[in-house]
Image (cartoon, rainbow, N blue to C red):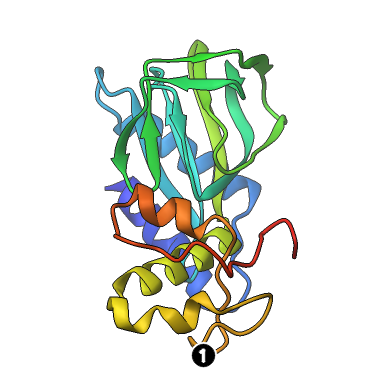
């Protein structure tokens, strides 16, 4: 009940103006409320602290480690609030399985870098980077947010639109050469053909694609 009231108060405060704010006392109270509300066998809890539209900064309370993970379209920024742990990041995710559109999980990470985590540490994990958190004490509490890779998101939307076109509607798109594609000025990245083929979208023109690296 205390946790629910505290969460409602924080979200109401964030909704009152354009700047979402939580004081140090708010953070401490939220962490304590999460601790007391978790069951004995519960390994993880997530609670939003401040919100601005779709952007959320949330507390993650870890008692048990999860599987190694990758967020393909999202960078992850966080600071350690309480407890201690380890982080493995980089390298290669082994046995990846798509859990949902924003998350891949695997069995382990090969070739990653290991770091110790303590309160005050700040981390930014780029989108597509394998990572894993271990808990070295009783808990590891993080305050973080996901940062969408908007360029990739826009690209995926354009590819989906292109793939949805009938074959007869695709030639105009195939004529694009560092210019407008015929889809209201949308351009198509150089790896569009490979992505669409992997997605089983059918025939894709061989030429006329703008390169991502080419600007």
Looking at the image, which residue sits at the far right? 214
Q: Quadrant of residue 32?
A: top left
Task: Residue at 37%, 61% (x, y): give it.
Answer: 8
Left or right of 191 in this view: 168 = left
Identity of the residue furthest to the front in this view: 206
Mark 1, secondary structure of its residue: loop
Q: State the image coordinates of residue 136 (x, y, percent, origin top left).
A: 53, 9
Quadrant of the drawing holding the C terminus:
bottom right
Q: Residues within 10 Å of mark 1 (few under 14, many from 20)?
A: few
> Considering only vertical position in the picture, is 44 above or below 212?
above
Question: Where in the figure is residue 53, as x and y percent of width and height?
Answer: 48, 71
Residue 36 vs residue 102, the one in the foreground: 102
Is 184 located above or below residue 110 in the figure?
below
Q: Which residue is drawn at 55% across and 65% down?
A: 207
Residue 190 percent across, percent down from the top left = 59, 59
97 vs 20, nearest the viewer:
97
Q: Where is residue 163 shown, x and y percent of the image?
A: 34, 68
Extreme residue in the top direction: 136
Q: Name the residue under label 1.
A: 184
User: In the picture, residue 61 is in which quadrant?
Assistant: top left
Depth order, front residue of 137/153: 153
**Picture layout, residue 66 above or below residue 210:** above
Can you say whether 198 is above or below 45 in the image?
A: below
């Amino acid at each position: 009940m205390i946790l629910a009231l505290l969460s409602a108060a924080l979200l109401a405060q964030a909704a009152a103006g354009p700047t979402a704010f939580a004081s140090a006392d708010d953070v401490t109270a939220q962490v304590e409320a999460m601790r007391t509300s978790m069951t004995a066998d519960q390994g993880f809890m997530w609670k939003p602290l401040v919100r601005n539209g779709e952007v959320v900064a949330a507390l993650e309370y870890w008692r048990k480690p999860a599987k190694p993970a990758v967020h393909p379209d999202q960078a992850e920024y966080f600071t350690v609030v309480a407890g201690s742990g380890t982080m493995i990041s980089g390298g290669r995710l082994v046995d990846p399985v798509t859990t949902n559109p924003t998350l891949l999980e695997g069995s382990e990470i090969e070739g990653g870098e290991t770091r110790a985590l303590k309160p005050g540490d700040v981390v930014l994990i780029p989108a597509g980077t394998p990572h894993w958190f271990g808990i070295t004490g009783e808990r590891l509490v993080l305050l973080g947010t996901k940062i969408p890779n908007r360029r990739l998101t826009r690209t995926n939307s354009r590819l989906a639109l292109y793939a949805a076109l009938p074959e007869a509607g695709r030639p105009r798109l195939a004529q694009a050469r560092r210019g407008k594609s015929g889809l209201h000025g949308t351009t198509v990245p150089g790896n569009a053909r490979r992505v669409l083929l992997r997605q089983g979208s059918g025939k894709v023109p061989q030429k006329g694609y703008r390169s991502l690296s080419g600007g």
